[in-house]
Image: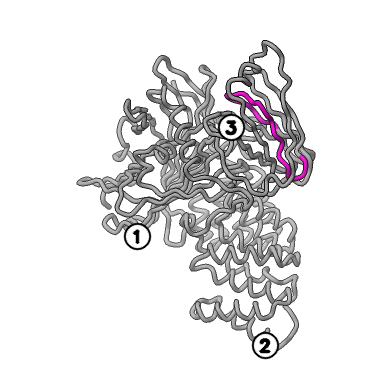
Amino acid sequence: MKRVKAIGLGCVILSVQLLFFLVSGINAQDPVVQTPNRTSGNSADQAFTQSPVSVYVNVRELNGLALEHSANVVLSCPLSGLRLSGPVRDISPVQFTHVPVGDCNVEVTSDGFKRALERITVNDSVVPRTQYVFVYLRPATEVGSSTARPLVTASLLEEMDKASEALRKGKLSDAQKHLEKALQSSPNNPDVLYLNGLLQLQRQNLPAAEEQFRRAVSIYPTHERSLLALGEVQVKLQESESATHTMETLLQQDSTSWRAHLVAAAAYAQLKNYSKAAKHAERAMSLGGANSGAAQLLLGQILAAEGNREGARKALQDLVANKPNDPIAGSARQALAGLDKTSAAPEPSRVGAEMLPAFSVTSMRVWAPPDVDAAPPSVSADVACSDTDVIQQAGLAANRQFQNLERFVATEHIEHEEIAPDGQSARLRTRDFNYMVFVEQDKKDKQLYLDEKRDGGTGVDEFPTSLATVGLVGLGIDLFQPGFAKALTFKCEGLGQWRGKAAWVVHFTQKPGERSFLRLWQTKIRTVEVPLKGRVWISTNSFDVLHVETDLRDPMKELELARDHISIDYGPVEFKKSKTELWLPWTAEIFLDLHSHHYHHRHTLSNYALFDVATENRISAPKNVPVDDDDKTPTQPNKKPE
């Protein structure tokens, strides 16, 4: 293979600025207005006369819908000493008037939900001086996220690889021996428990498989494969209510999983909630690509079960016509024959359950997420946003955080995984690097530039398979710098959420004929600029970047690069000495289809140390998973740099 390195420019980070946008439906009722009492000599009183801002706080459930219960909102601004509170009633926001410019906190409490705390920065740069804040509440019964990904030793990885290979070959006794060794050394590793669940699944011991998947999820609640497997087993066991909860949990963290939507459709169909079942089946069809036949067959079953025989017939006929050679087409023909022979609908309790065995967790899995354009994320229909304002405020926030920095370092842990043709891991190698980022700002146009180094260079010689990538920190900031952004077309798709945080969802595409230099691929003899498209989730309350995903705008034939999917999660990292925080990458995943081979890279950045223009600050290591609502400072059990 040619020695190649991928270089990505761009960044992470962002703080809040004022955004004025149109809100339709939000003011259906008059807001509750809270105005502070003025006291002579109060520092807050001085701020009122300088630049008063009205802040509207809108509270929603995690699904984005307006909160049906009442909630109490407290707005506090530590520097000015201001503290206000007010109720949220029905769909009306609470309005706080004469709020001074600066950093403030918004706290929301409501019966049945966890306490939510959001940091905002009030700014008067937009006229009229109005700022909207969105807070999503999590159910009180929701299980918290794990504090860190489990560590995997070389010996444990070897046993897991041997167990996986034995499972693929159907050698269940060999698989059990390797899993017993793995469980002895790491009894609470969710990946080992997941494999043990697969073993029980192949033995047709569904209750035992369910127990293993439940254990994995209890230890690591965001373990995607275990959640999916648990949901499938619950459908097969007719535990429909539990299956819907499991799938909704999974879809909150990955709304583009076609199989999760398929399992959710089956579970809702068993509950005779055909409306929700049909929506999930249709979503699975749009996401499934070559695998959409199963979802279309299930949709036909659902429509028939609710009495829509014509709709069912059309769905099944389309499946047979469009996928005549698909094995699932045989089942569709049988279903059509059944519709023609009898007027009775399929037995509701069996709808969907019979669809899952052929698509069990032991079958071929999708090796990479869908393209960013395959399935737009869900957004609230009652809130609109301005492309220009969001991008401008995100850029200003990024510049404000980095303008006084020279460089910072981190420890980077990389897992390089080669993916076999069946979608399973063929080989996994790991490596740790020292990651340094140099920050420069152009004196004329004030544009930021981040130069990222790994062990003093790009790290290509030490990187597994000599395939290296840098630029994970820079991507989330370069998107909003004028020099890069002028080559992109932005579209703010609306109000969405990322891991329970309200976010503006912004799609971007590189313009034809223009070069952005956001993503560069370098071989031994040349550097190739790779046009991108993608989507970024920007905090509505702080304009911090929460998440970025990118894909190739077009396949790069000259590089034999068919897929280059990047997914980066950002989060707050506290600087203890300077009592400030930056938003930096926690984890990043890269999926490559290069020279007809599949690769998966996972990058985890921790042990950050910051150097500003005057002094050196050390900061706590970030988690590689989101923090609980009650504690926004990430920690990770890694050693600080010497």
Range of the magenta residues? Answer: 89-107
Instruction: Give the x, y percent position of residue 483.
Output: 34, 39
Residue 150 picture quarter: top right
N-terminal of the pair, mark 2 or mark 3, is 3
Kindly report the distance in space between the C-alpha atoms of the residues bearing marks 3 and 1. Answer: 54 Å
Q: Residues within 10 Å of mark 3 (few under 14, many from 20)?
A: some
Residue 25 shows in the view: yes
550 left or right, relative to 112: left
Nearest to the observer: residue 463 or residue 206: 463
The answer for how far apart the CA atoms under marks 1 and 2 are is 45 Å
How far apart are the two marked residues, 2 and 3, measured between alpha carbons?
Answer: 65 Å
Which residue corresponds to mark 3?
129
Query: Circle 1 is placed at which residue position?
Result: 596
- Counting from the top left corner in percent of width and height, residue 506 is at 50, 47
Kindly identify the amino acid type of the residue bearing the numbered disc 1: Ser
| Element class at badge 1 | loop
The overriding secondary structure of the stretch rendered in magenta is strand
Packing grade of label 2 (10 A; few <14, some 14-19, many >=20) is few
Between marks 1 and 2 in the image, the one whose residue lies nearer the viewer:
2
- Could you say which disc has been placed on residue 340 in the image? 2
Amino acid beneath label 3:
Arg
Residue at point 26%, 51% (across, down): 2
- Estimate the x, y position of residue 61 in percent, counting from the top left: 70, 45
Check disc 2 and give the amino acid type.
Asp
Q: Nearer the viewer, residue 1 or 267?
A: 267
Q: Secondary structure at mark 3?
A: loop
On screen, 203 above or below 628?
below
Q: Secondary structure at mark 2?
A: helix
Q: Earlier in the sequence, mark 3 or mark 1?
A: 3
> Which quadrant of the rendered structure holds the C terminus?
top left
